[in-house]
Image: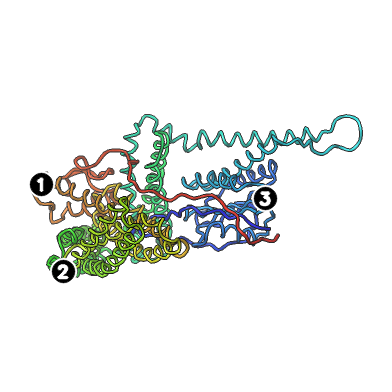
Amino acid sequence: MKLRVGRAAATLTVVAGGALLAAPAVADDPIRMASRVVDVTSDQVAAGREDDLLEAADEVVAATDFDLWTVYVDSFDGMRPVDWANETAVASDADSDVLLLAVAVDDADIGLSVAEDAPITDAQVSDLEAAVRGEVARGRWVEASFAAADFLVALGEDAGAGSDDDGPVAAGGGGGSIWPWLIGGAVLLVVVVAVARRRRKATGTPEEQQQRERWAGVSLEELGTRAGSALVELDNDVRSSANELAFAEAQFGIEATRDFKATLATAQQQLGQAFTIQQQLEQASSDEQRRRGLMQILTICEQAEAALDSQTEALAELRALQDRAPALLDELDQRAGELEARVPAARDVLRQLGAVYPETALATVAKAPDQAQALVASARQSVAEGRSRVQADDRGTAVAFARTAEDALQQVAKLLDMVGDAGQTLADAAARLDDAIASLTADIADAGRLAPGDATLAPTVERAQAAVAAGAAAKTGGDPIAALAELEAAEQAIDAALAPRREQEQVVARATQRATTQITSAETAVRQANDYIETHRGVVESAARTRLASAVDDLAQARSLQGSDPQQALAAAQRASESARTALSLAQADVSRWRRLQETSQGGGYYGRSGGIDADSMILGGIIGSVLSGGSRSRSTWGGSTGSWGGGTPSRSGWGSGGRRTGSIGGSSGVRRPSGGGSRRSGGGRRR
């Protein structure tokens, strides 16, 4: 029995907490299904709903010629989703009437296995995939199977309406047969059940109805503002929690922090889901769609925050019971001295780089030594405060000061590492200039050979020539990263213009070559943007973070497609670079805006001190401010702009009263994801 093969949709990668780098999902090999519904995901996404799923599958059997099987896994492990589904169907001895739906929750993707001789057209398979993907895109894993069941039942109803088969006739004479009545009643029951489910989906789940009631009086603009603040807060808290977990594992061991680690992993997944919804809102066609998406973001963020809060409180209680506070403070004091000793070297590195590169090339690290010095001073003051609390037998507060120092020193190390890596990053970019110039020069020559005198290509060729000139100039003291970005953008434009004139084989070969280079550039851009946001997270708002999440997703897609579809991999890598550069630009704008506010409120200079603790540097870095909130994990930043520990209450909204941006979260970005396609037939077979 042959199988039909559908084209896989673009894979979405969950953002991973502190580093915001694409973490590999738990991989699952194709399996042998022991039931029509199987859930082997880490989070058991179908737990408690198995009976509902089986009931939906029974409805399909009753109303159609099909049998619906569903399997939930964490990841397809880089396989084409349809191949994964086909191999599972073969291993499970599925008959030709079986439609096997495989859902990978970490990939947010599906695979559909359909027998070649199944009584369903390719167009209908494409429509079925579209219905299922709509639910998967919203993270509604169980509803994805319900959508497949409803589609098949409706398909069976349409087929039945056109049939003139009266069914079996009872043996014997006289009287009419009861079978038509029984069959008619069964079909009516299936139709009623399917319509009821569709009505339930139209009105929403009870949870969705509660959301609508809760936010009924809130304007769409205010919902957007609240959702944006919630995303910033959750992103900051996930990052802070990742740092907390690292310290907790070192202090208390793996076993004692197992629940915290699991909760953080779930929160990271929820954060990725929320960012994905926000990106999708950029293409929303109605206010109702935007309102529904914003409510989903708020609900997801609230659930993740509540879970993180419960684990953080448990960890704080654990810390409060420990007797290591004096030793921990001593270790932090020693660590502060070690890091402070690296600051002069970082300044020397920047001076040396400044003699070679322009200011624009060093913008992301120019203030890193100053910020690191301020954070070291704040960490030392926190250590001093902690020691005084130990002497006063207030170890709970001493631990809170220790946690603040821990987070501050973590950022100091990151800032100094950024400076240390800057020279190599610039050198790597400069080393790639020659290849990029040569490649684009070859494109310019191709344009002259393949389309001589074509006026429509003139602007593209002129841009390419300018990029080559700028790249050559950057080799002797310019900004190699910016020059490389323009070379790549110009090459993308000229490649697109020349593609119809080149043989397909040449196009693929060039895409394969360029994909590797572009992925390397994207990795640099993503790392640079992530490091900057990580070390300035206290004032960076959701727009920059969303662009970074999009860049991470596209970079992961580029890596996964590099071997199988280099053209799509190249496009994904180019999107990743563009989104990462946009994220960095937005983040720098946020920081510049915050610094101007601080200069205005403090009469010049960023860093306001109170008792030796540099509150502004803590705010800028989004450092844990446990002391301010009685030992619990602080929220994103602190309200007000007085630059002191007591100058404001903990703020859940970002910059406090003076610096928060307003506006809807669903604004346009121009960043698009590739969508899935239809289905096609292929050879190969599957035996019963």
Is 188 placed left or right of 434 in the picture?
right
Can residue 391 be seen?
no
The residue wearing badge 2 is 349
Q: Mark 1 and mark 2: span between their CA atoms? A: 30 Å
Q: Between residue 526 and residue 22, name the one nearer to us.
A: 526
Residue visible at 41% across and 40% down?
A: 293
Q: Earlier in the sequence, mark 3 or mark 1?
A: 3
Q: Nearer the viewer, mark 3 or mark 2?
A: 3
Is 348 placed left or right of 105 in the picture?
left
> Which amino acid is tagged 2?
Val
Q: Secondary structure at mark 3?
A: loop
Q: Between residue 238 and residue 574, name the one nearer to us.
A: 574
The residue wearing badge 1 is 602
Q: Nearer the viewer, mark 3 or mark 1?
A: 3
Image: 267 above or below 27: above
Image: 627 above or below 504: above
Q: Secondary structure at mark 1?
A: helix
